[in-house]
Image (cartoon, rainbow, N blue to C red):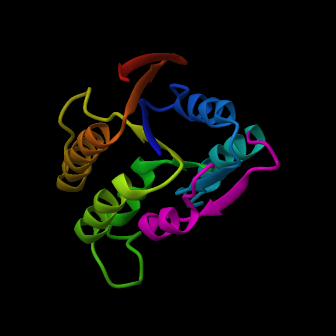
Amino acid sequence: MMRELILGGARSGKSAFAEKRAEFSGFPVTYIATAQVWDEEMATRIRHHQERRPDHWCLLEEPFHLTAALKARAASGHCVIVDCLTLWLAQWICPDCKPPQDGSWEQERTAFLDLLPTLPGKIILVSNEVGMGIVPLGEINRRFQDEQGRLNQAMAAACEHVHFIAAGLPLTLKE
């Protein structure tokens, strides 16, 4: 079992790097996409990702219940990419996006962190580094930045490999 975290800014090349790592593994790949289409610009972003992925990869779209999706899909001799933790978090804490089911971000996060070390196979997690700028205006924006920073720190501690991507170039932070 192997867990890997790929961090970077928007359009840094982190998803493409994660996809190369998955392909290099030689395992069958399941791609768990957390994005939802909210507008045409997001639809274009999603299409860009879809066009780059091999057709033989399995795709699962899961914007909220990532813990259950990973539990169902992770397997020995298999690779799972989660792209991305940032959208997963944003959709959980956004008042307009919250899932209709019972539960909270805190419960989902705890369940995810508890499950991660037990998962078989190769798990590649993609996440945005959002803490390199100023503290944003607005309570929800600050909460998002704080929660994302905490999530990234927890993921980095739980993963055997951590890479930071800038301008398409990887910097290994942990190996």
Question: Residue 126: percent from the left, percent from the top?
Answer: 47, 41
Residue displayed at 41% across by 83% down: 100
Nearer to me, 156 or 63: 156
Left or right for 153, reference 68: left
Question: Residue 41: percent from the left, percent from the top?
Answer: 61, 47
Question: Residue 147: percent from the left, percent from the top?
Answer: 23, 50
How many discs mark residues in the rendered view? 0
Residue displayed at 38% across by 23% down: 175
Question: Residue 40: percent from the left, percent from the top?
Answer: 65, 53
Q: Residue furthest right?
A: 55
Region of the chain picked out in magenta, as a range: 53-77
* Magenta stretch holds residue 72: yes
Nearer to me, 27 or 49: 27
Residue displayed at 74% across by 42% down: 53
* Magenta stretch holds residue 125: no
Left or right for 25, reference 84: right
The answer to whether residue 2 shows anywhere in this view is yes
The answer to whether residue 64 shows anywhere in this view is no
25 shown above or below 68: above
Residue displayed at 35% across by 52% down: 117
Left or right for 95, reference 56: left
